[in-house]
Image: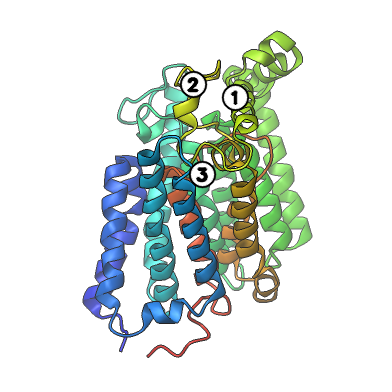
Amino acid sequence: MLRITKLSNFYFILLFSFIPISIFLGSTASLVNLFLILIGLFLLYETGLLVFSFKDRAFLSLMILYLYLIFNSFFSLNFEIGFLRNFGFIRFILLFLVINFLFYKKFEFKKVFKFWLIIFSIFIFDIIFEFYNGHNIFGFESENKKRIVSFFKDEQVVGAFLNGFGFILIGYLFNRYEKFSNKQKIFLFLFLITFVSSMIFSGERSNTIKLIIGLMIFFYLNDKIHLKQKLFFLFSVILIFTLTFLNVTEIKHRYGKDLINQVKDKEKRERILYFQLYKSAFAIFKEYPITGVGNKNYRVVSCGGTFELACSTHPHQIYFEFLSEHGILGTLILLSIIFYLIFKNYSKMLVRRNLIQIGCFCYLIVNFIPILPGGSFFADFNATFFWINFSIFYASNFHTNIFSDFKIK
């Protein structure tokens, strides 16, 4: 029999609640926390859990994706670093199993979401604090003063952190209230406005665009609020951005003058780091068009002196990352499997209108907006956000949960 005891319930609540804290503590803490969660899979395993999993198309598709990544390792210019990243991807497939199983067994994820909401709110407060004071509550500050670092000290990734948890929490808050009272409407409105404002203040243009587009999709698919309320929220966001843009010099430069000047001027445009990275990634793709240079191997070529390329750990754009490191063959495999897994449950999502699931769907979709820069898709930081959202996307709706068709006692 597979069951969740009081002890295992506490175990998972503690570890899942710790995920956002482990992420800003660093990759080691995040990996250890995830490893402890996965150990729980085998603590719960008494009969047939993995056997049941292999009967599900989503799980089988993920295993095909995993086998492809192992295959990709043999085409890596540096086999060791490619294989280590590819082999380690199994942890996200196991996480997918754990989250689906816990939702299936009605694990108290509400307690986890409440704790995430507290951590998320602390981050929002800290971003606003740093925006007005030049440093966060611990004294951390960005070197170039253009973007917020918050608790990440010397890394400008707080926008990715907000989006990674934000769409789940928005869905949770809307799902929580079946019928909205006026107080609940005001609370949700203020929460959304504060979230969007903090993202604008972060100076992360790409993640701000992703957030706005994601929210537009969320509101379009959300049938719990009326058209007037949707338009009112949209108008409020536009108004807040306009007022901030007109009155705050840093925002005016970051989202306006600085960006426009770079794009209009050909010489400045050629010097934009992201454009250089995109050109470098495409140059690598042309040299290795079929299989690419291997996962995590962009750095090997771009920093190895073979070509005159922009040296970086990755191209900072998902399609250029796929093309340069996986070639046309790998890119087609990756995108086909991922898009299939996301859209295969689209109709079930629309029928049930589970807003946690819709929130996760919005996050998954905005990761694939063309041109916009972002982190490496397979790096631990970004991959953790993507596969948590992906796992909850499946698990939170009983009709898409991979265990829903099987009678697990």
> How much space separates mark 2 and mark 3, taking CA atoms?
18 Å
Judge left or right: residue 216 versus residue 278: right
Q: Nearer the viewer, residue 41 or 253?
A: 41
* Residue placed most toward the observer, 320 or 250: 320
- Residue identifier under label 3: 377
* Mark 1 Cα-neighbour bin, 10 Å: few <14, some 14–19, many ≥20: many
Q: Earlier in the sequence, mark 2 or mark 1?
A: 1
Q: Residues within 10 Å of mark 2 (few under 14, many from 20)?
A: some
Q: What's the residue type where badge 2 is placed?
A: Cys
Disc nearest the viewer among 2 and 3: 2
Would you name the residue on which mark 1 appears?
280
Q: Which residue is at 70% across, 54% downward?
A: 217
Q: Which residue is mark 2?
A: 311
Disc 1 is placed on an element classified as helix
- Which residue reaches farthest left? 7
Q: Position of residue 199 (x, y in %)?
A: 55, 37
Number of the front mark, 1 or 3:
1
- Mark 3 lies on a secondary structure that is loop
